[in-house]
C-alpha cells in the first residue's frame, strides 16, 4: 500500500480533467492561464510547473489553451467520457471512439 | 485542486474596494467580436477607446475561438441584395426581426470582411486548394456555402480572426482591461434613464474596482443565458460558456434602457452532458451542410427540396429549385427554404425503413465537399479546430474512410441532443433572443449608449456582430466628438460598491451554483413550455422571494467566485424581465416559442407586435412596439450611415 498521507478531501466537481498537461513538455509559461476564456487555471506556485486547474467544471472546451500553447503536445484537450463521439470504418465495419 | 491536502493560496494580489479611474472617449463593454470591431472603428474615428472584457480579449466572445461562415453578405460576385437578405430572415422570423441591425449588417458585411482581410484574416482560397469547386469564384477566389448559385454565404478561415482583431486593437492604441467584468452603467447625476457617462468594472483576479468615464459607451456584452438550464457541475459543457449570463442586459435594464422580445424561448441544450461537442457528431447542418447521412446499413437518408421532393443528385443540395430566387442558411419560410434531410426521417426510422444508428458519411461525397467540411469548416469554426478537428484526427478519424455517428435518435436536434420542453434557452445560437431596442444609429433608448452584436434584440451570427460593432463604434466615436465628459455621482459609485462587494463580506450564505439552479427551477416550473397568468405571477413571486431572502445571503470567497456570484444576480434580473414580458403578452406565438394556456390563439393579428420592457425607479413598465418600427430601410440607412 502507498505510504502517502490520506486527507479528508471533498469530491472534485465533474468533469475534473478538461485538459491534461504533459509535465515533461510544459514549461510553466502560463500562456494558457492568460488566454483561457473562463479563467479555470491558476499559475502553479512551483514556478516552471504546469498550471493548476482550479475550476475544471467551468471549462468550455474551446481549445484555445492548446492553440496558444507554445509547446506542441504540452496540453491535450480531454473531452469527458460521456462526450466522446463514435465513428465506424466503412470498409471493415470496425467501431472506434474518439 | 489541492496541494498536500490544503487549498492553494489565491495567486493574485487582492485589493477589494480599491478604485482606479479611467477616462476615455469611447468605452466598449464586452471585447468579443462586436466589441473589438466597435473599438477598432471608434479608434479609426479618432477616439480614445477602452475595452472592458470579462475574459481575455485575445480569445473571448462567442466567435473568439473561430468562425467558418460569414453569411448573408451581398458582394460583387452575387446578385443578392441587402433587401433580399433581410427579407428571407424576416420571413423565417414571421416578422419578428431586427430589420435595423440586419439591414446594416447586410449593407456593410462585405466591407467588414475586406477589412478583416487587411488585418490578416484569410478570406480567399489563395492556395487554390479548392480550385474548380462549384462553391468557388475563380476570379476572386472566394468560397461560398449553402446556395452555390447565389454565392452570398462566405466560407472563411476564421480560426485566427479574433487574434487579428486583438492585434489591430493594440496597434490602434485601444486600452484593454481584461479579466474585468462590467457591473453597472454610470448615468448622469446617478439617475436612471439619463445619459450614460461610463461604467464600473470588477477585476476578477484582484477584486479591484474600475470606474470608467466615457463620452459614449457601446454595449457589446452577451445575451442572457442560464435562465432555465443550469447544471452545477457541468457548467461549461453546454453550448454556451459560463461567461454568458446577461450581465449587460441586467445593468442596462437597471439604468433604464428599453428591451424587447424577452419572452421568446425554445427548448434548449440541457448542458448536463447529454449533448456532444458542437459539430463533433454526424449531422448535416451549418458547418456540416450538405453532408450525406446514411443508416447502419449504409443506406442514404434522402435529401428533399422545399416541397418534400427527394433529390437525386448531390448538386441539388446546394442549388435553389426552379423558380426559387435563393435559399437561406436556416429556417422554414417556404420561399427561401433550403434543401434538407427529409423531414419525416425519424418516422421512417421508427417504421423500420432505416436502421439505427445513423452516420455522417463523407466518403462518397465529392472530394472538394469532403475537404470543405473536414478541414476548412471544422478546422475553423468556434470550438472545433482543437476540440474536433485535431482531437478526432489524432484519434484516427479519417473522413475518406470513416463515418461519424449521429445521436439524433436521442431526441432534440442535430446540435443540441436531447431536450426537455421546460428547460429552455432565450434564443437560437448566438443571438435572436430578446435584447436592447435601438434606432438607426444603433443607439439605445439611453443617451450616449450604443449597442452591437448579441446585446441587440434579435441579433445574428459572426458577420452581424462584426458589422454592427463596426457601425456602432463609428457612431459612438462621432457622438464622443461632440460631447463632454460628465463627472459620475459619488453616491452611484458607492451604492454599486456596496452591491458588488456584499458577497465577500458574508459568511455561510448561498453560493452561486445553488442560487443559479434554484432560480432556473422557478423558470422551469412557472415560465416553461406552457404559461398562464397564474403561473407567471407565482414565478415572479418566487423569484422576488429568492431575491429578498436568499440572494441577499449570497457569498463569495475570492474575486473569481465573486464574479460568478454577481453574474447569477444578473440572471435573476433577466428572469424578472422575462417573466414580466411574458405576462404582458396575452397571446401565443409559434415563432416566439410562446404557449399561453389562457390565451391559446396562435399569433392573433392584434398581438403581432413586440412587447417592450424598461424600468422607472423600481417599477417595471411594459409597452408595445410595432414590428415595422424601423421604417423604410434604404432611406433610413442612407440618412444615418
Image (tube, rainbow, N blue to C red):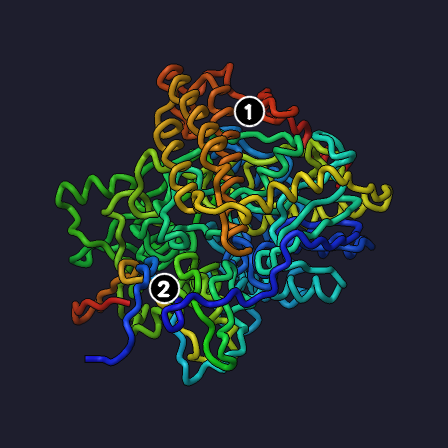
Residue depicted at x 47% and y 27%:
B579
Picture coordinates of residue B553, whole percent (x, y): 48, 39
- Tag count: 2
Picture layout, residue B338 above or below residue B52: above
Residue under pointer 1: B610
**Along the line of sight, which residue is nearer the eye, B517 or B167?**
B517
In the figure, residue B631 lies in which quadrant?
A: top right
Any part of residue B605 in sight = yes
Residue under pointer 2: B366
Picture layout, residue B612 above or below residue B8: above
Residue depicted at x 26% and y 58%:
B405
Picture coordinates of residue B555, whole percent (x, y): 49, 46
Q: Earlier in the sequence, mark 1 or mark 2?
A: 2
Any part of residue B624 in sight = no
**Crowdedness near tag 1: few (<14), some (14–19) or many (≥20) residues, C-alpha within 10 Å:** many
In the figure, residue A62 lies in which quadrant?
A: bottom left
What chain does badge 1 belong to? B
Residue depicted at x 71% and y 29%:
B193
Q: Can you tell which mark lies on residue B55? A: none
Amino acid at each position: 500500500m502507498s505510504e502517502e498521507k490520506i486527507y479528508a478531501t471533498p469530491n472534485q466537481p465533474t468533469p475534473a480533467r478538461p485538459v491534461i498537461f504533459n509535465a515533461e513538455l510544459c514549461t510553466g509559461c502560463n500562456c494558457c492561464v492568460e488566454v483561457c476564456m473562463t479563467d479555470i487555471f491558476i499559475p502553479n506556485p512551483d514556478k516552471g510547473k504546469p498550471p493548476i486547474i482550479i475550476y475544471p467544471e467551468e471549462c468550455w472546451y474551446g481549445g484555445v489553451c492548446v492553440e496558444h500553447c507554445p509547446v506542441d503536445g504540452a496540453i491535450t484537450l480531454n473531452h469527458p467520457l460521456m462526450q466522446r463521439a463514435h465513428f465506424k470504418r466503412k470498409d471493415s465495419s470496425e467501431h472506434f471512439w474518439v | 485542486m489541492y496541494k498536500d491536502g490544503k487549498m492553494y493560496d489565491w495567486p493574485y494580489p487582492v485589493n477589494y474596494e480599491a478604485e482606479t479611474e479611467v477616462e476615455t472617449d469611447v468605452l466598449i463593454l464586452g471585447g468579443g467580436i462586436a466589441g473589438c470591431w466597435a473599438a477598432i472603428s471608434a479608434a479609426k474615428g479618432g477616439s480614445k477607446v477602452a475595452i472592458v472584457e470579462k475574459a481575455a480579449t485575445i480569445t473571448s466572445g462567442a466567435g473568439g475561438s473561430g468562425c467558418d461562415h460569414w453569411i448573408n453578405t451581398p458582394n460583387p460576385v452575387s446578385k443578392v441584395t441587402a433587401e433580399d437578405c433581410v427579407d428571407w430572415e424576416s420571413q423565417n422570423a414571421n416578422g419578428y426581426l431586427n430589420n435595423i441591425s440586419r439591414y446594416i449588417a447586410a449593407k456593410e458585411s462585405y466591407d467588414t470582411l475586406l477589412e478583416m482581410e487587411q488585418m490578416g484574416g484569410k478570406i480567399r482560397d489563395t492556395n487554390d486548394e479548392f480550385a474548380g469547386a462549384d462553391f468557388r469564384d475563380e476570379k476572386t477566389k472566394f468560397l461560398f456555402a449553402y446556395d452555390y448559385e447565389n454565392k452570398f454565404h462566405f466560407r472563411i478561415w476564421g480560426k485566427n480572426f479574433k487574434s487579428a482583431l486583438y492585434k489591430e486593437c493594440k496597434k490602434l492604441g485601444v486600452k484593454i482591461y481584461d479579466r474585468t467584468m462590467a457591473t453597472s452603467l454610470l448615468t448622469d447625476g446617478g439617475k436612471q434613464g439619463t445619459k450614460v457617462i461610463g461604467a464600473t468594472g470588477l477585476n476578477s483576479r484582484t477584486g479591484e474596482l474600475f470606474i470608467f468615464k466615457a463620452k459614449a459607451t457601446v454595449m457589446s456584452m452577451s445575451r442572457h443565458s442560464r435562465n432555465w438550464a443550469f447544471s452545477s457541475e457541468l457548467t461549461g459543457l453546454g453550448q454556451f460558456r459560463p461567461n454568458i449570463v446577461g450581465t449587460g442586459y441586467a445593468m442596462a435594464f437597471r439604468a433604464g434602457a428599453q428591451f424587447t422580445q424577452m419572452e421568446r424561448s425554445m427548448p434548449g441544450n440541457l448542458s448536463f452532458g447529454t449533448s456532444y461537442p458542437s459539430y463533433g457528431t454526424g449531422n448535416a447542418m451549418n458547418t456540416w451542410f450538405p453532408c450525406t447521412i446514411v443508416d447502419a446499413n449504409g443506406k442514404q437518408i434522402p435529401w428533399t427540396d422545399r416541397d418534400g421532393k427527394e433529390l437525386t443528385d448531390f448538386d441539388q443540395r446546394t442549388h435553389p429549385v426552379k423558380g426559387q430566387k435563393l435559399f437561406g442558411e436556416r429556417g422554414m419560410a417556404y420561399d427561401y427554404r433550403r434543401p434538407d434531410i427529409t423531414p419525416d426521417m425519424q418516422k421512417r426510422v421508427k417504421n423500420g425503413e432505416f436502421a439505427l444508428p445513423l452516420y455522417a458519411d463523407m466518403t462518397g461525397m465529392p472530394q472538394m465537399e469532403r475537404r470543405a467540411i473536414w478541414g476548412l469548416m471544422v478546422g475553423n469554426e468556434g470550438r472545433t479546430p482543437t476540440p474536433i478537428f485535431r482531437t478526432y484526427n489524432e484519434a484516427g478519424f479519417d473522413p475518406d474512410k470513416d463515418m461519424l455517428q449521429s445521436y439524433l435518435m436521442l431526441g432534440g436536434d442535430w446540435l443540441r441532443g436531447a431536450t426537455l420542453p421546460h428547460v429552455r434557452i432565450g434564443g437560437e445560437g448566438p443571438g435572436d433572443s430578446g435584447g436592447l431596442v435601438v434606432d438607426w444609429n444603433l443607439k439605445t433608448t439611453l443617451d450616449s449608449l450604443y449597442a452591437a452584436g448579441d446585446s441587440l434584440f434579435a441579433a445574428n451570427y459572426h458577420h452581424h456582430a462584426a458589422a454592427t460593432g463596426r457601425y456602432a463604434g463609428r457612431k459612438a466615436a462621432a457622438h464622443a466628438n461632440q460631447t463632454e465628459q460628465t463627472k459620475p455621482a459619488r453616491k452611484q459609485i458607492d451604492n454599486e460598491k456596496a452591491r458588488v462587494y456584499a458577497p465577500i463580506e458574508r459568511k455561510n450564505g448561498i453560493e452561486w451554483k445553488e442560487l443559479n439552479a434554484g432560480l432556473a427551477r422557478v423558470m422551469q416550473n412557472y415560465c416553461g413550455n406552457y404559461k398562464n397568468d397564474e403561473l407567471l405571477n407565482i414565478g415572479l413571486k418566487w423569484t422576488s422571494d429568492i431575491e429578498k431572502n436568499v440572494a441577499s445571503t449570497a457569498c463569495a470567497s475570492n474575486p473569481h467566485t465573486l464574479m460568478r456570484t454577481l453574474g447569477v444576480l444578473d440572471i435573476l434580473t433577466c428572469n424578472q424581465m422575462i417573466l414580466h414580458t411574458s405576462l404582458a403578452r396575452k397571446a401565443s406565438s409559434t415563432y416566439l416559442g410562446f404557449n399561453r394556456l389562457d390565451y391559446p390563439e396562435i399569433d392573433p393579428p392584434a398581438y403581432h407586435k413586440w412587447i417592450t420592457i424598461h424600468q422607472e425607479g423600481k417599477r417595471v413598465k411594459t409597452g408595445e412596439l410595432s414590428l415595422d418600427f424601423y421604417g423604410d430601410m434604404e432611406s433610413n440607412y442612407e440618412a444615418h450611415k
